Image: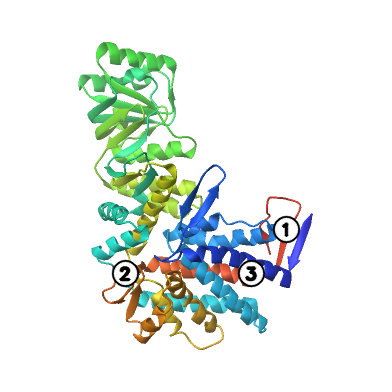
Amino acid sequence: MKKVICNDELRKNIENAINLLCNTVKMTLGPGGSNAIIDHSLSNPYITNDGVTIAENIESDDIVVNTILELAKEATIKTNENVGDGTTTTLVLLQSIYNEGIKLIDQGISPMVLKKEFDNIKDIIINKLKENSRKPTKEELLNISNVSSNDTEIGNLIYSTYIRIKDKNSIVIKEGEYDTYVRFLKGYSFDTDIVSPYFLKSNETIYNSSYILLSDSIIYSLEEISSILNFINENNKSLIIIASDYEETFINEILSLVINEGYKIILLKNPQYGFKQLNILRDLSSISSASINHDSYNIKSLGFVPQIKINKDITTISFELNEEIKNRIIQLEKILSNEIDEYEKDYYYKNIAMLKNKTAEIVVGSPTKAERREKKMRFDDALCSISSAYNGIVVGSGLPLYKISEELNNDIYSSVYKIALKSPLKQILSNAGADDALKNIISSNYKKVYNVVTSKYESVENTKIIDSLEVVINSLVNATSIAGMLLTTKSLIINENNDEVDNNIV
């Protein structure tokens, strides 16, 4: 049965959800923030101070509150997806904007007018943030990485890797066993789907200066590729064929040529399915200049690569960047810009990185699974922070937002942001037990910032306390967006007889 919740009853539930979510997460903000223990039904409990991880695990027995919680979480989840940092700041801003906005609604201001004015003020704040930003130095990028990970070893590894690759999506972080290390990879790699182990004479077969034949269909007989086989044999060249599949007789005949007559041929099946089958062929075509054949094969359709390595798990093709590859990258980036599915985005990111011929893999190791998981989160945070900071930084600790709050107009709408923009700095100092530092910061005319780690004041000109401009803007944008949605919501429809929450807010 559907239940409708409106007006004051709904507002009470929204306030309960906002306070449950934000009060829990904001205690972790800043270097002086605390940790949270998260129980997991499928594994051991673990400790973290990662805002989005804590937020995602907060639930309520009240299905109405839980429905609103899921919506409110979108603010921090969106920030994490966009820049990977600033998730706790987002919730601190969200709570303050919502609470102050409710006060104006109680004074008779239309929620829709309020939301429109909030969007206008948000744009003014963003412009002011941009005016106060600048490009980071290498030393500052290293510091951002160290601060975000709260570990100099992790920070240094992320920094050195990012400076070399300069593309977050080209760096893969995964859990390993005991050791932590980074390896830089070159070439285009895909899963090996070999039709017979007899094609591999050792653990890894390497062919230099190899020809490639691509097919989007099944190859049935030797006659179909007879001219190509003659060319390969006469010139003593190697040939890698990648097709959808092969007739069994064809496989046996090729094997006979390899074993008995010394032909250097390997038959691989296309390892992908669906639309990705054609995608990998197009990638390989751009790398090798091979044609994608269907049922007609000749020497002109062959491609060429400097080197190909094949083992039972992975096939890697070395190549030099050319115009075909550059055009293929542009094509994939256009597809990526219209993709909304996160899994598919990761697929395109990986392919683009391989075609750019620069990828890195960081393997995170620790003695226990719980420690590895927590350590990997630190690596993820550091990578996201350094990536988002690469194009612009501002002074950290929420100081720019606090200063901008004093510069806003004195109208009734701006009064909300005059309070909200002060909340991140206040929370950071409160978590560190340094509330009194705020007076000294203000008296310095915001030319000093308090370093929670060293318990000392630093000049904003020389401080190592910095934030990514992109992170601060995303925190503000997403907090304003969700607060505006909640302030303009007056009814909720829910199936109270279903344990699965129906997030249908109108």
Check disc 3 and give the amino acid type.
Answer: Glu
Which image quadrant for residue 103?
Answer: bottom right
Q: Which mark is residue 494?
A: 1
Check disc 2 and give the amino acid type.
Answer: Thr
- Sequence-earlier tag: 1 or 2: 2
Element under disc 2: loop
Contact (CB < 8 A) between labels 3 and 2? Answer: no
Question: Which residue sits furthest left?
Answer: 235
Gap between marks 1 and 2, in whole Å?
Answer: 50 Å
Seen in the picture, residue 247 relative to 437 is either above or below; the reply is: above
Seen in the picture, residue 343 relative to 469 is either above or below; the reply is: above
Q: Position of residue 56 (x, y in %)?
A: 54, 55
Gap between marks 3 and 2, in whole Å?
Answer: 36 Å
- Sequence-earlier tag: 3 or 2: 3
Residue receiving disc 3? 15
Viewer-nearest of labels 1 and 2?
2
Q: Is 17 displayed left or right of 147 in the figure? A: right
Element under disc 3: helix
